[in-house]
Image (spheres, rainbow, N blue to C red):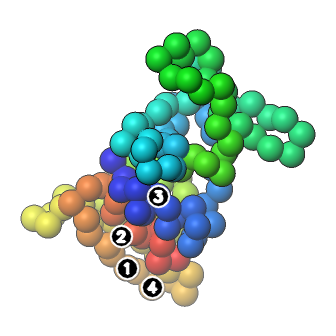
Amino acid sequence: MISLDLARRLAHDAGVLWQPAPGDRFVIDTKLLTDEVFWVSNLTIEPQHFADQTVLGFNGTTEWALDSVSLDQSLWLPREDQLRTLLGDRFDSLRRTDDGWEVAYAASDGTRHTVTDADVECAYARALLTL
């Protein structure tokens, strides 16, 4: 799973925007809740839109005393497929190496670059952060 640090950097430094959808993972980005990973689901947690704000509604979760949490208090933990989609046509290849996972991609000037990480999602995130 992508690290919290890389997820924060994608959101804050790279400006990656999150449009919550079923299957998305996230944490509530406060000290006491970052160890709890939540999944958006139409059955329990769903994006709700009120005026100019999106909140995540906790429906039917009796174990948590949460009704909703604003999107800006949440930190998206994108999956491998979502990170690959964000790379778009710049993505070239993914391969397993002795050091982990290597993502090859093209920079805006067309030059080919690679990043490697032990975690495949972190490798994709590192590639995105260099664009």
Observer able to see residue 78: no
Callout 2: few (<14), some (14-19), or many (20+) C-alpha neighbours within 10 Å?
many
**Label 2–label 1 contact, CB within 8 A:** yes
Residue 128 versus residue 33 in the image, above or below: below
Residue 10 versus residue 54 in the image, above or below: below
Quarter location, residue 41: top right
User: In the rendered image, which residue does mark 2 sit on?
Assistant: 104
Helix, strand or loop under label 1: strand
Residue 111's disc is 4
> At which x and y percent is residue 29?
51, 50
Task: Specify the amino acid type for callout 1.
Answer: His
Residue 66's disc is none
Tell me which residue sits at (66%, 31%) in the image. 68
User: In the rendered image, which residue does mark 1 sit on?
Assistant: 113
Q: Gap between marks 2 and 1, in whole Å?
A: 6 Å
Q: Earlier in the sequence, mark 2 or mark 1?
A: 2
Q: Earlier in the sequence, mark 4 or mark 2?
A: 2
Q: Earlier in the sequence, mark 3 or mark 2?
A: 3
Is residue 99 found left or right of 123 in the rendered image? left
Helix, strand or loop under label 4: loop
**Label 1–label 4 contact, CB within 8 A:** yes
Tag in front: 3 or 2: 3
92 or 82, nearer to the observer: 82
Task: Specify the amino acid type for callout 4.
Answer: Thr
Residue at the left extreme of this rendering: 98
